[in-house]
Image (tube, helix red, strand yellow):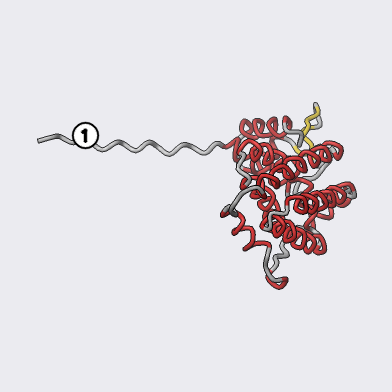
Amino acid sequence: MTTLPPPAVPLAAPRPNLAEQVYARLKAEIHDFQLVAGDRFSEAELGNRLGVSRTPVREALFRLRNEGFLEVEAKLGWFVRPIDFDKLEHLYDLRVVLEMASLVKLCNRVEDPPELEALKDVWLVPVAERLTDARQVGANDEQFHATLVRAAGNPEIARVHWDVTERIRIIRHLDFTRLDRIEATYTEHGKILRAVMQRKADQAQLLLKTHIDQSKAEVRKITLHTLHEARSRLPAK
């Protein structure tokens, strides 16, 4: 009789990476304007607030500094850096290039990829069914643009595009703290989506560029006072 091998001993579940958790928490707070430019804090204060030791806090803080969100000064501690609007504008320009190239590839496809059906369910809805929650609309907006790029079929473009998305999120969400901008986003996304489904590449590109340029123009109007106001207007998690 053949002897079966003993059952494999299950591996212990990996311990959560505290530094990664702290990093994600702080980055979310920056993106949600719970922390805004000029806010100061120490490693000890953060450790106490988050219930972790200073080691994972420090690792997360230096990672965020390397990404340009934070800075540290001797004896004064850490602070949230002012937003570099020139850099953001350059990232918006890169975003336009990536998305317009993806629209051409998407319109050249013979059949609609299944991803477009999911976008229709979100954006081609009656006015009464449109969302008004700033955070949810912001997340859906990100997914709309990322899905169009991903559906075009070039994973490297999609990867670079998502990196750009991560870096402009801190400002992009402000576009949805006003109801008129939410309504405009629904209208503009619907037009872009219909043009893609009709394989009208030139029209889709023009609509997309106008849509993103308008968003970029809104970014230029943002001031520190606006950021503090946005922090109070956005719904708490």
Q: Is residue 85 left or right of residue 101?
A: right
Q: Residue at x 89, y 46 (%)?
A: 220
Task: Please determine whether, in this image, residue 87 is positioned above or below residue 207.
Answer: above
**Residue 204 on image: x %, y %:** 75, 53
Q: Which residue is drawn at 77% across and 38% down?
A: 94
The part of the image, by quadrant, that contains residue 236 is bottom right
Q: Say if residue 236 shows up in the picture.
A: no
Q: Say if residue 221 shows up in the picture.
A: yes
**Residue 180 on image: x %, y %:** 82, 63
Which quarter of the rendered picture does the N terminus lie within?
Answer: top left
Residue nearest the observer in this picture, 52 or 103: 103
Q: Which residue is drawn at 56% across and 54% down?
A: 114
Kind of residue at badge 1: Pro
The residue positioned farthest toward the top in the image shown: 74
The part of the image, by quadrant, that contains residue 95 is top right
**Residue 196 on image: x %, y %:** 69, 54
Task: Please determine whether, in this image, residue 91 is positioned above or below residue 200.
Answer: above
Task: Please determine whether, in this image, residue 78 is positioned above or below residue 124.
Answer: above
Residue nearest the observer in this picture, 152 or 187: 152
The residue positioned farthest toward the bottom in the image shown: 128
Numbered label tally: 1
Q: Is residue 132 left or right of residue 178?
A: left
- The residue that mark 1 highlights is 5
Which quarter of the rendered picture does the C terminus lie within?
Answer: bottom right
Mark 1: which secondary structure? loop
Q: Residue at x 58, y 53 (%)?
A: 111
**Residue 84 on image: x %, y %:** 84, 37
Mark 1 neighbour density, 10 Å: few (under 14) some (14–19) many (20 or more)? few
